[in-house]
Image (cartoon, rainbow, N blue to C red):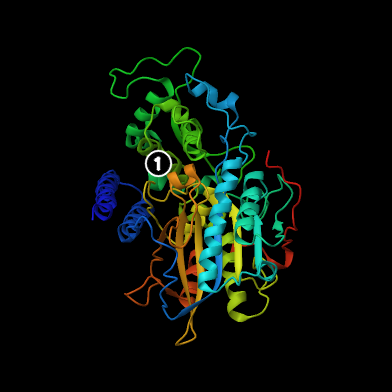
Amino acid sequence: MERFFRPLARLAARFIRATKVANRAVKRGAHPVGRAAVFTALLAFLLTPVPSPGQSLSHAAKDDNTVLKQIIIFGRHSVRSAAAPSNVISVFASQPYPDFGVPTGYLTPHGAQASVLLGRYFRDYLRAEGLLSGKDAEDAEWSYFRANSIQRSNITAASLASGLLPGASVPIHSFPLGTPDPIFDPIAAGVVTADGARAVKEVAGIYGTEGSALSAAYRSEDSLMRSALFSYPRDQQPPPATPSGLTDATAQPISLTASTGKVATTNVINVGGLRDRLLATDPFVMEYTDNLPIQEVAWGRLSLEEISQLTRIITLYFAIDTNPPYLNQLQSSNAMAHILRSMEQEVYGHKVPGAFTGKRAHLLVINSSDGYVEGVASLLHMHWLLPGYQPDFCAPGGSLVFELRRSKRSGRYIVRAYYTAQTFDQLRTLTPLTVERPPATQQLLIPHGRDDARTLDVDFGRFQEIVHEAIDKKYVQNPTTEVAPGPLAGVPLR
């Protein structure tokens, strides 16, 4: 009973705090678009089901009178090294950050193993559901794997493939390393052009024109972060001075201006000191999940719960640079259109231009980074809360899962959406996963999609309408000019 009420109590407390923030924003005269966005998010957050720690993707042992026809796993890479090189982040801490043993931003060997285990879970689940036959070479013919053009995503996809289809040679489709993929980064790929002034105006309507309010709202995280970075008790007052030669990331002002120079997806807004905070604390999650000695994880100064709390900085970053309506449509419409068209290809039984692949595929694994996953989820106003994680945090290896199912009775198609991720400790200890011992998973509410109060399933026709309402077609790549990436070889793990 306690396992149920504890996350429910946390959810209620967070909602109350968020409501107070929204009310204060309205009293300050926040822009109407901002008020609407705030209360829409609050409503969706309230309606988000509270997950159980061991919920699996579906009740494989229970016949729900549907047949799984297709699954699209749209996920994040697994555990990697720090996102920034040591010469960048070393100025933020009084001690050196631990060495992951791989180049900056690379998937670690531990992260690759975690992805293999997740792939084995999906194999177990999809065989129970009848989507995979267990004959890997045959199943591979109906599968498609794609990753954005960075090492950690390529190797994550390859590792998932080795767990899902161990007896087959599965190609990973990706552009050459460093070449922007328009599915994930339509701005850098030249598919769309960001209007920085419009983006800033919209963000200001939600968060105000200055970042001081955000700094105040995240004062607890700043205090926790600073004490870990500079090695002093969190309750020490007044806090000691910044050590000579170092930079206090928490003292850097948060800005909400247009990025200059080379702009890419998830980088349209210059958030100033918020990025310093993110880079300074980003390694902590990776240190824990990579199974580094506990005394090296945040130098032994933070509990796992405190590390999780600091990930609110990461979700705030994406809330600003990915989720506002204009930025969301600009950056995520192309990916969402490809997800829908790939489903349509399965439903209609023929090629649909603009799908991920020209062939019908029952299993699609699309791997990239957390910002791209957050963007797609935000388009459909989907939210999640998994045990141990902060709301909407995209964990290493975490994935949005779209299932296309067909009713045995009526023959109609329905869509189920999930968010699934290995827990902190499943990642750290490389816990074997099965249908009986699954990763943490939560079926997601798609607002305005339910036609049956007993389930969260969405009729496929209604799902099409929701997607078309959510995206902006002018930000979707023209299928006639699209060039899909070919199989990639020779991507180094080290």
| Nearest to the observer: residue 434 or residue 330 | 434
Residue at image x 61%, y 69%? 134
Of the 4 image quadrants, the one containing the C terminus is: top right
| The quadrant where residue 238 appears | top left
Reading the image, the residue beneath label 1 is 312
Residue 330 lies, in percent from the top left, at: 56, 55
The answer, for residue 265, to whether it is visible in the render is: no
Relative height, residue 324 to residue 220 (above, below): below
Count of numbered badges drawn on the protein: 1
Residue lying at the far bottom in this picture: please name it. Answer: 410
- Secondary structure beneath dot 1 equals helix
| The quadrant where residue 70 appears | bottom right
Residue at image x 59%, y 75%? 344
| Nearest to the observer: residue 202 or residue 295 | 295
Residue 84 lies, in percent from the top left, at: 58, 32
Residue 443 lies, in percent from the top left, at: 41, 63
The answer, for residue 90, to whether it is visible in the render is: yes
For badge 1, the amino acid type reads Arg
Residue 105 lies, in percent from the top left, at: 61, 38
